[in-house]
Amino acid sequence: MGHAWELVRRLTERLDDHSTLPAELRRILQILKISEEAGEAAEAVIGALGQNPRKGFSHTWDDVRAEVCDVITTGMVALHRLTPDPAEAFTRHLARIAERDLEERPEQVPSPAPSPFTGTAPFYRRYRSGPPAPAAALLARSVADVEAPTLLVLGSGTGQVPLVLHAVFAQTDMVEPDAGMVAEAELLLPYLRGPGQTVRLHPVKAEDFTPPSETWCADLVTICRAFDWVGQGTVLRQLDAWITPRATVAVMGDRSLWTLDNGWAQALRLLIRSFLGDDRRTGADDIFTPHGRPYADVLAASAFSDVREYRFEDQREWTPHQVIGYLSSTSFASRAAFGDQWQAFERKALRLLVEYCDEETGLLTENNTFTVLLANRP
């Protein structure tokens, strides 16, 4: 840390050498610049989450980290202008915070086990969408009459479902076993917690989830694009004890690029098979084996046998590079699954996708359907 403060001292002197402003004004402007840099960090977060409707995913989390470093550096320069010994002032202040907030070490959270999605999380966060707006509105209506409702998200990934639903709920519990997904979701937590809201992340399998308290009960449970990845019978039996009498279980998702009928998706699927074989992969080593029964039948045979189906047409447009990013988020075409063949596959995939792009827009159109199964006790 001492070396960092020495660099800040030299940087401040260099800035002063090029300034004609009085020292007092330089101090004031430096403090104001902290707000400017913080605003750029906030803009980067919005861009990394793809929440600017005009720009979409305009930043990465690397950009966010860089902007935060700019905030810290600007603050260090400001502190240097305010005191002759900024390192001592900062250390003393940090010690007071530690004495106040670190009296006890927090309990260590166990590391999640590896999964078929190992290595996919950064791409999953950026290229996987949450439920479309009409589906999100349907889910919100299921708890419209509940005061301070609780949401349980099984297979929460990097947080796509909580991102579109969290404002409706007083408590949100996210359950996700993949270590990379958990790390990405942790970055999202500060933006999910509003006044009076509690958001918890549980790095375990759905079958191993334990409610956070004896009185805890969920009013809505969502399993989005993850029902094939959980022990369906076990989870549904456990949910019977975890949720309120009128709670809803929502199993939902859409078709992946492995099953889409679009011509470009079919051609891309053939290319994937030419590298990895005809069977659908789950990561680097395993073959995907679906449960086989329709989800509606599985739910109907459980305690939640009152099942209703809702379908929402969902058209998306992709650039070829975005399609490659999406593939990197999947278990069947992850970079780990390709191994040292990835670069060769990526080159061929990009050439193939460019040939299918619309001549005017340069984009690929995906026609999909997002299906929501709402299940309740009869």
Image (tube, grey):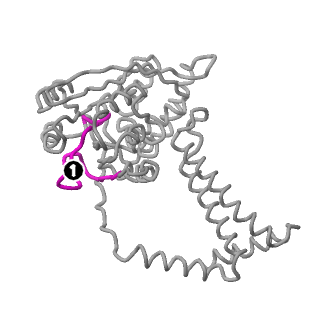
Inspect this view and state whether residue 368 appears. yes
- Left or right, residue 174 beside residue 124: left
Segment colored magenta: 199-228
Mark 1 surroundings within 10 Å by alpha-carbon count, few (fewer than 14), some (14 through 19), many (20 or more): few
Tell me the SS state at disc 1: loop
**Where's residue 210, x and y in %?**
20, 53
- Left or right, residue 31 beside residue 307: right
**Where's residue 104, x and y in %?**
34, 75
Residue that protrudes farthest toward the right in the picture: 20
The image quadrant that residue 141 belongs to is: top left
Depth check: give the residue in front, 331 or 268.
331
* Residue 208 painted magenta: yes
Residue at mark 1: 216
Vertical placement of residue 301 versus 325, above or below: above
Vertical placement of residue 88 versus 68, above or below: below
- Left or right, residue 289 beside residue 49: left
Residue depicted at 66% across the width and 61% down the height: 34
Depth check: give the residue in front, 49 or 216.
216
**Where's residue 375, x and y in %?**
20, 29
Circle 1: residue type: Trp
